[in-house]
Image: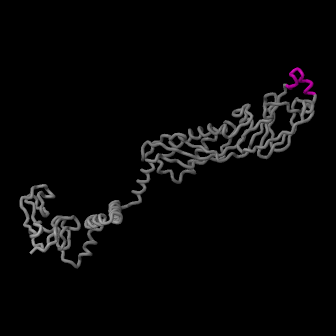
Amino acid sequence: MNTFDSAIFLENIEWFDETGQELVHRLPEEGSGEIKWGAQLTVRESQAGVLFYEGKACDAFGPGRHTLKTGNLPLLTKIISVPWRGNSPLRAEVYMVNMKYFTNLKWGTMNPVAFRDSELGLIRLRAHGVFNIQIVQPVLFINSLVGTMGRFTTDSIDTYLKAVIVSRFNDYLGEVLDSILNLPGRFDELSLQLQKRLIGDFAHFGLQLSQLYITSITPPEEVQKAIDDKSRLNVIHDIDKFVKMKAAMAMEKAAENQGEAGAGIGLGMGMMMPAMFAHGLGGAGVSAQTSDEKTTTCPDCQNVIPAAARFCPLCGHQQVVLSQCAHCGENLALNAKFCSKCGHPATERPKVTLCPACKAENLPGAMFCNHCGQRID
């Protein structure tokens, strides 16, 4: 269109946001122009239009078609603007404001914030969430934030709004929360109260904070582990029984994975298991199993045990008396040089039976050598 045609014809002004992220868009895009008297402005339901004429905000327009009134008269303006090389000094532009809700804007702490927990001490927390905004005062928003920018998107203000939310969140959390262990079930309450604190900060720029949600408040990994351990302890009412169960499971697993060696470990540990479970069961199981057998009393723990037992199944005390320590009376094992209880030298040597084949020492009365298996006559 040549200069003469542009001086005659009127403008049709409208705008569509294809990105979904523009808050404000200026028309004409290259800057102010000679919007003429009678130009038509079409505003959609989700928009508002603000006419700036001669550097001032003159009118704000809601949904519908509007006729703009400026000092630029078709054809006559070109004649009057000759001293300005054909450019009219009566500059005008329209700012189209997107009035829809901008949702799913994310906020979060870039760096952990310090929090004094009443139970865990001084810890560092990270918090994240989402918020929604809407422009409710177009002229105030343009004058305070947009200025003369041709387009203004959510990215242009996102960083600032996040910083404001995090700042308010830090103060608020320290005032209302004593321990992060009390967080479950309070996210809705905390989100609502934090939103109320931020209303004034957003309204200062003509914005409405429609919703704000706290999606997570997380401590460092080591604090999370401590919380998990505390939760497990609360679930386990009898820690003694729990430890014994874990030991039994570990022995069973070792026996399965280590072959013959594991079987030996399992057999040896199996002899000790009655003593491990004795306190938890109160000796009832052992007594029930040995009710039909001859019993005796262990000289060390004073519990009733089978008379044929070589070791006490409850305390492990040796029942077969080969010799005793002259110092404390503890039963001594075969070939023992020192007492296992008091460390006193074993001055008395027990009587032994020598194998005629390998000359190994055996218990008195042994019929077969426990080293070579030969019969002892």
Residue visible at 86% across and 26% down?
Answer: 88
Quadrant position of residue 316 = bottom left
Pick the residue in front: 366 or 91: 366
Which portion, as a residue range, is magenta?
A: 76-88
Figure label count: 0
Q: Quadrant of the C terminus?
A: bottom left
Residue 358 counted in the magenta span: no
Q: Position of residue 100 (x, y in %)?
A: 73, 46
Quadrant position of residue 99 = top right
Magenta region, main secondary structure: helix
In the displayed structure, does residue 244 sit left or right of residue 15? left
Task: Look at the picture and state if 345 lies above or below 166.
Answer: below
Pick the residue in front: 64 or 34: 34
In the displayed structure, does residue 369 sit left or right of residue 205? left
Q: Position of residue 60 (x, y in %)?
A: 79, 37
Task: Look at the picture and state if 368 lies above or below 204.
Answer: below
Pick the residue in front: 48 or 20: 20
In the displayed structure, does residue 266 sit left or right of residue 8? left
- Colour scheme used in the picture? one colour
Residue at the bottom extreme of this rendering: 292
Q: Is residue 268 visible?
A: yes
Residue visible at 14% across and 72% down?
Answer: 374
Residue 85 counted in the magenta span: yes
Q: Position of residue 120 (x, y in %)?
A: 42, 46
Q: Position of residue 68 (x, y in %)?
A: 86, 36
